[in-house]
Amino acid sequence: MLMFDPTYLLFIAPALLLSLWASFRTRSAFNKYSRVRTLRGLTGAQAARAMLDSAGIDGVQIQPVNGMLTDHYNPVNKTLNLSEGVYASNSIAAVGVACHEAGHAIQHANAYRPLWLRSALVPTANIGSSAGHFVMLGGLLFHSANLVLVGAVLFSAVLLFQIVTLPVEFDASARAKRLVLANGIVLEQERVGMDRVLNAAALTYVAAAVSTLMTLLYFLFRSGLLGGRRN
């Protein structure tokens, strides 16, 4: 079974450790600063609305969604969806996350190209995610390097999507960090906690890309397409 292949562990273990560390940092920072109230007392929803208003953006609906850290902006219907711990909370963590998502709405309104590219890649990435891994696995089981290569091409769409996601997420955080101060949503001393929450969350996207890359390299290596090794 491939799951017990020691070589697989050599490839995936560093990415797994990075993912676990990023997840721990994100939850730790969010939990810590979710207990610290902002001096202005704006909730996540109010902060996001203030940020959108300051950018002259209307037509974006802000609504609550179930789950923890399930926050996201949907450019298709222009909805800014904030999780239960963010929407009605006036904590530094909640305001940071909400304003980050508002940053995506501002990107959309300003036709930020990486956001458009990420949206365009979603269908291809979904196909690559669902089919690519299984095709590569089938290639190894049937000792077909060509089949692994087909799967690798499909799976590469996931990696491309994740790489494009990085500047989108970093830029949204940068906008949030800049505009919350410019619009008095948080004070300078409160930005430290907000930065820690957003920086930790950004690391999870890096970890996801690294994990996908290492998975892809593993299958290429096992098939002999990388490093000249043949099974």
Image (spheres, rainbow, N blue to C red):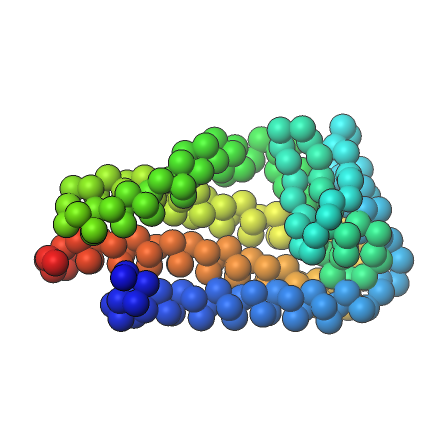
**Residue extending furthest toward the front:** 1
Expressed as whole percent of the image width and height from the top left, the position of residue 199 reads 59, 62
Residue at the (17%, 53%) spot, across then down: 223
**Closest to the observer: 119 or 219?**
219
Could you tell me which residue is drawn at 73 percent across and 48 percent down? Answer: 66
Q: Nearer the viewer, residue 163 or 187?
A: 163
| Residue 51 visible within the image | no
Relative to 5, residue 155 above or below:
above
Count of all numbered marks drawn on residues in the image: 0
Residue at image position (14%, 55%) is 224
Q: Position of residue 42 (x, y in %)?
A: 86, 53
The residue sitting at 61% across, 47% down in the picture is 172
Q: Position of residue 156 (x, y in %)?
A: 33, 44
One can see residue 198 in this view: yes
Q: Nearer the viewer, residue 106 or 32?
A: 32
Nearer the observer, 85 or 182: 85
Residue 194 falls in image quadrant: bottom right
Residue 99 percent coordinates (x, y) = 72, 49
Tell me: 127 left or right of 226: right
Image quadrant in which the N terminus is located: bottom left
Say which quadrant the C terminus sits in: bottom left
Classify residue 189 by image quadrant. bottom right
In the visual, does 144 lie left or right of 55? left
